[in-house]
């Protein structure tokens, strides 16, 4: 608003204009009562067009007798949607644990132990919903120096230091199967943003201001960003921004059908990766300590 706003209603009345549409920012809405009174005194109907240009999206709801405007659309903010997603998580994770993980765990445990001594599972602190930390499980796919108990960090899925078994389970996504235990416990969801470490959350949060928006959701075993090949470590702001954009897109458009689509497409992509890996198989590289 500016100094000419005070005269707009008298000018409208003078020229026979019956309706005035006024765009106000959230800060300027505090003057709405004075504007409505002035418009009615001139027999002009005032109609508001809220200015949300600064917001990428917003949602309008009713609470009791109040109209509530939220900055972002978030279908999972409502209790019925959270209940449906949780029910789906419990049902599917229970099926996977009983019919797949029950026999997959001992097989991979033996292979991991034969390939390299050390723990079968990696237990890592990750940031969960509302940025609360939790213990995240996965099958160990990296080597461990038994003498000093240190891990040799594998920067990528195909790091040369990773044992052959480790490369296989990471390439196929089998390393994530213990995370179905996290889903059943309520720390994670089957579909959601990738769970990051506290360190990476702080780093990415400092690089991209919208990073923490993704923390409104439970982290997932699979997700929309991962499906679109936005995964792994990066310090490039453009890639981080795109990754966060995909996570926010998922949050604002969540539906049961979208979750099913992501699950189906992820399974299909993993099968395709496995077939390519079998066709382009190369001799295993070994690194001596």
Image (spheres, helix red, strand yellow):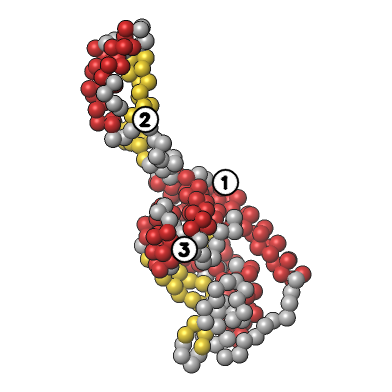
Distance in Å between CA atoms under marks 1 and 3: 22 Å
Which structural element holds mark 3?
A: loop
Q: Secondary structure at mark 1?
A: helix
Q: Which mark is residue 257?
A: 1
Q: Is residue 32 left or right of residue 132?
A: left
Query: Which of 170/260 is in front?
Result: 170
* Numbered disc 2: secondary structure: strand
Could you tell me residue 1's position as x and y percent?
30, 27
* The quarter of the displayed image where residue 9 is located: top left
> Which quadrant: the C terminus?
bottom right
CA gap, disc 2 and disc 3 = 36 Å
Toward the front, the furthest residue is 3
The image's mark for residue 50 is: 2
At x 65% / y 63%, what residue is drawn? 270
Q: Residue at x 43, y 61 (%)?
A: 204
Q: Residues within 10 Å of mark 2 (few under 14, many from 20)?
A: few
Asked if the residues shown at circle 1 and circle 3 are in contact, with their CB atoms under 8 angstroms apart, the answer is no
Q: Is residue 130 above or below residue 144?
A: above
Q: Residue at x 52, y 53 (%)?
A: 242
Q: Is residue 80 visible?
A: no
Residue farthest along the bottom direction in this orientation:
147
Q: Which residue is mark 3?
A: 195
The quadrant in which residue 232 appears is bottom right
Front-most of 206 and 229? 206
């Amino acid at each position: 608003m500016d100094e000419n706003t005070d005269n707009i209603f008298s000018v409208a009345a003078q020229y026979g204009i019956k309706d005035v549409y006024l765009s106000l920012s959230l800060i300027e809405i505090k003057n709405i009562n004075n504007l409505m009174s002035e418009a009615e005194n001139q027999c002009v109907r005032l109609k508001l067009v809220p200015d949300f240009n600064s917001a990428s999206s917003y949602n309008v709801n009713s609470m009791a007798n109040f109209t509530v405007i939220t900055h972002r659309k978030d279908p999972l903010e409502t209790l019925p949607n959270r209940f449906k997603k949780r029910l789906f998580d419990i049902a599917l994770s229970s099926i996977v644990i009983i019919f797949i993980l029950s026999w997959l765990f001992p097989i991979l445990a033996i292979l991991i132990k034969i390939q390299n001594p050390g723990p079968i599972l990696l237990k890592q602190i990750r940031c969960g919903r509302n940025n609360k930390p939790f213990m995240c499980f996965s099958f160990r796919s990296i080597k461990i120096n038994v003498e000093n108990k240190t891990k040799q960090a594998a920067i990528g899925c195909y790091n040369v230091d990773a044992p052959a078994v480790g490369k296989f389970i990471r390439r196929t996504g089998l390393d994530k199967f213990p995370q179905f235990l996290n889903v059943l416990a309520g720390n994670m969801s089957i579909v959601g943003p990738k769970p990051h470490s506290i360190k990476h959350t702080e780093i990415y949060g400092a690089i991209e201001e919208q990073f923490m928006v993704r923390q409104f959701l439970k982290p997932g075993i699979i997700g929309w960003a991962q499906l679109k090949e936005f995964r792994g470590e990066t310090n490039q702001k453009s890639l981080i921004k795109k990754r966060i954009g995909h996570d926010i897109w998922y949050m604002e458009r969540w539906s049961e059908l979208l979750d099913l689509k992501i699950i189906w497409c992820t399974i299909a992509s993993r099968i395709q990766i496995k077939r390519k890996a079998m066709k382009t198989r190369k001799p295993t590289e070994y690194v001596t300590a």
